[in-house]
Image (cartoon, rainbow, N blue to C red):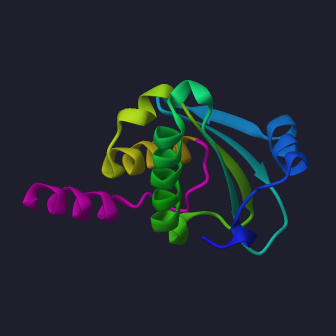
Amino acid sequence: MRKSYRVKSEKAFGRVFNEGENKANRQFVIYTLKKDQPHFRVGISVGKRIGNAVTRNRVKRLIRQAVFELKPYLKPEMDFIVIARKPAAMMSQLEVKKSLIHVLNLAHVLTETPSAIIKSDSRSEHRE
């Protein structure tokens, strides 16, 4: 994902935290803020309580990949931050994606529920 799609600065993170709304499930917390911009931006936060550096980087990669796959379904006018909770460290790629779809639906960030993606992924998982 290109840098223009990322929330990087402390100021931008703070604005989303302070002015935005939040929704959560057991694995993730999502903070959202509506902005006037051509595309969405995402910030990812994985704290030290999740595990060591290898585990935290793995969780960030899984979240980034899930967001990349959900890109066509995300509202363009949103900044959002994904905060991983401890159970996310033990999840597979498909589980991360399903959990993110659930919490993004709660936060009204998705334009539509990508149920076709979930069904196609679950079929390919059974083949392995």
| Left/right of residue 49 with respect to residue 97 in the rendered view | right
| Left/right of residue 18 with respect to residue 32 in the rendered view | right
Say which of 12 and 59 sits in front.
59
Say which of 9 and 102 sits in front.
9
| Vertical comparison of 32 with 83: above or below | below
Q: Which segment did they paint magenta? A: 107-128
Q: In which quarter of the image is the N terminus?
A: bottom right
Q: Most extreme residue toward the front, as rendered?
A: 53
| Left/right of residue 14 with respect to residue 22 in the rendered view | right
Name which residue lies at 52% across and 72% down: 72
- Look at the image and say whether residue 118 sits in the magenta stretch: yes
Q: Where in the figure is residue 67, as x and y percent of width and height?
A: 52, 59
Q: In which quarter of the image is residue 24?
A: top right
Q: In which quarter of the image is residue 69?
A: bottom left
Name which residue lies at 51% across and 33% down: 52
Name which residue lies at 74% across and 64% down: 77
Say which of 117 and 51 sits in front.
51
| Vertical comparison of 82 with 5: above or below | above
Q: In which quarter of the image is the C terminus?
A: bottom left
Q: Where in the figure is residue 57, as x and y percent of width and height?
A: 52, 47
Say which of 53 and 14 sits in front.
53
Q: Where in the figure is residue 28, as x and y percent of width and height?
A: 53, 35
Name which residue lies at 53% across and 58% down: 64
Q: Quadrant of residue 31?
A: top right
Q: Where in the figure is residue 29, as x and y percent of width and height?
A: 60, 34
